[in-house]
Amino acid sequence: MFEYFFRHRRRVSKEQKIAVDRKVRRFLPRSLLARSLLMISLPLFITQAISLELFYGTFLSTVSRRLTDSVSGEISFIVQQYSTTQSVVYHSALLDQSQQSLQLNIKWLANQSIQSKSNSNPIILGPVDELLDRGLDDRLSVPFKTDWHSYNDQVVVSVQLKQGVLEFLVPKKKLTAGSVWLFVIWIVGSAILLFLITAIFAWVQFRAIRRLSKSVEKFGKGRDPGTLHPVGSKELRNAAESFNVMRERILRFVKQRTVILASVSHDLRTPLTRLRLSLAMLPQKGMINAEDQALDIAEMVTDIEEMEQMISGYLSFARGEGTEELQMTDMVQLAEDVVAAAYRLGTQFLSADIPANIPDMMVRVGSIRRVLANILENARRHGGQVSFAVREKDRGIFFIIDDNGPGIPEEKRESVFIPFETGNSQKGTGLGLAIARNIIQGHGGDIELQNSPQGGLRVIIFIPN
C-alpha cells in the first residue's frame, strides 16, 4: 500500500512538473536571441530595481528625515513665538525675519480655520510627506495640515491657532534631495543603455548563427549555399569552418558517387557485349563439344572475371571506410605488418625506416592497412625497388613511399585521384588511389605525390593526431 502511494505520488509529481514546464515555456520567447536578451535584461533590471529600493529605503529616507526635522523644527519655533504674544508689530517682524532667514513665506489668515485634511506627495519624492507630518505632529500641539498639490514648487503647511490660521509656504527644495530625479534617471537610463548595447552585440553574434542555420537548412534541402564566410566569435568561426569542411566532403562524395553511377554502364558494356557475341556464336541446337568451344568459354570466363574486378572496385569505393570504428593503434606494429605483407608478395625494399618512438594513434586499422598495401603494390608493379619510411611531426605522422618506376607527370598527378583515372595505359578500374585518398581524408589527412629521389614517384601520406 505504501509502495503504491509513493509510486502514485512520484507519478503525479512528475506530471505536475511537466505541466508547469509547459506553462513556463508558453511564456518564453522562441528565438535564441530573444531568450538570451531576456536572460541578460532580467537580472539587469532586477539589480537596478534593488538599487532603487535601497536608495529609497536608506539614503533617501535618512536625508528626508533630516530635512523634514529641520523644517518642522522651524515651523514649530515660529508657531511657538507667534503664540506667545498678541503684538501685531512683533508678529510682523517675526514673519519678515523668518522669510528672510529661513526662506519661509508665512501668511496670517485671521478668523479662518482648517477645512480639509492633508494630502500626500508624489511617491517619486520618497517618504517625505509622512516624515513631515510625523515631525509636525511631534512638535505641535495644535491642528495642522499639509498640502502638496496646490503649488508645483511649494508645500503649504497650515497651522490652526485661536484667532486664525498661520500658513507656511515651504519650498520643496528644502524638503527633498536635489539629486533624486537625477539618480532615478541615471538608474533607468543606464539600464536601458546597457540593454541596447547588449542587444546590438547579441544581434551581431546571432546574425552569424542565423546565417549558419539558413546555410545548413538550404544544404539539407539539396541546394548548395556556397562557402560560408566565418565571422563572429571563435566558436562561431569554428562552426562555420566545420560546416565548410563538411559541405566540401559531402559535395565531393556526391560527385564521386555520381561519376561511379555514370561509369558503371559504360565500363560494363564492353565485356557484356563480348559475352553476348560469344553466346551468339555457340551452336543453338545439338550437342556442344567442350573442346571445340574451349577458347570461347575461356574468353567468357575472362570477361566475367573482368566484370567481377570492376564491380569489386565499385563496391570498395562506394563502401569507403564503411562502418569501421576508430581505435587506438600501435602505428609501429601496423607499419611493420604492412611491410612484411608486401615483402611476402614480392616487393623489393631498398630500406624500411620505422622508428620505434612513433606514437599510438586513433585510426581505422583495416582502412589504413588497405591504403598502405595498395600504395606499396602500385610501387611494386611500376618500379622494381621500393623505400618505405615513417616520420613523426608535431601534428601527426607521415608515411613516405618511394619507387624507381616511370613516375607520373606533374600535370597528371591530381587527376589520378579522380575515379576511373589510371594515370597510365595499364589495365585497371582507376579506383585505388581515389579510395585511398577518401580513407585518408576521412582521418583528416591527405595524400600528396612528388618526384622521388630514386627517379620514380614519391607518395606522402599524412595522418594528423
Image (cartoon, rainbow, N blue to C red):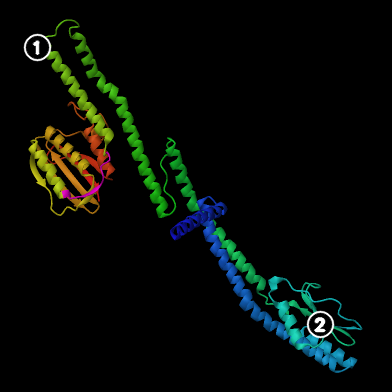
Query: Mark 2 touching mark 1, by CB under 8 A?
Result: no
Q: Which residue is mark 1?
A: 291
Q: For this view, does 384 lie left or right of residue 392?
A: left
Q: For this view, does 362 lie left or right of residue 195?
A: left
Q: Residue at x 23, y 38 (%)?
A: 436
Snapshot quadrant of residue 265: top left
- Identify the secondary structure beneath mark 1: loop
Q: As displayed, is residue 269 above or below residue 233? A: above
Query: Upstream in the sequence, badge 2 or badge 1?
Result: 2
Residue sticking out furthest to the top: 286
Dot 1 crowding, Cα within 10 Å, few <14, some 14–19, many 20+ = few
What x and y, as percent, mark residue 288?
Answer: 14, 9
Give the residues in magenta: 322-331
Question: Which residue is more in the foreground, 25 or 282?
Answer: 25
Q: Amino acid at mark 2?
A: Phe
Q: Is residue 217 visible?
A: yes
Q: For this view, does 433 lie left or right of residue 11?
A: left
Q: As displayed, is residue 328 above or below residue 301? A: below
User: Is residue 168 within the magenta segment?
Assistant: no
Q: Is residue 415 visible?
A: no
Dot 2 crowding, Cα within 10 Å, few <14, some 14–19, many 20+ = many
Q: Amino acid at mark 1?
A: Glu
User: Is residue 323 within the magenta segment?
Assistant: yes
Q: Which residue is mark 2?
A: 144
Q: Can you say which quadrant of the picture contains the N terminus?
A: bottom left
The numbered disc on residue 413 is: none
Q: CA distance from mark 2 to mark 1?
A: 139 Å
What x and y, as percent, mark residue 459?
Answer: 19, 40
What x and y, as percent, mark residue 356?
Answer: 13, 53
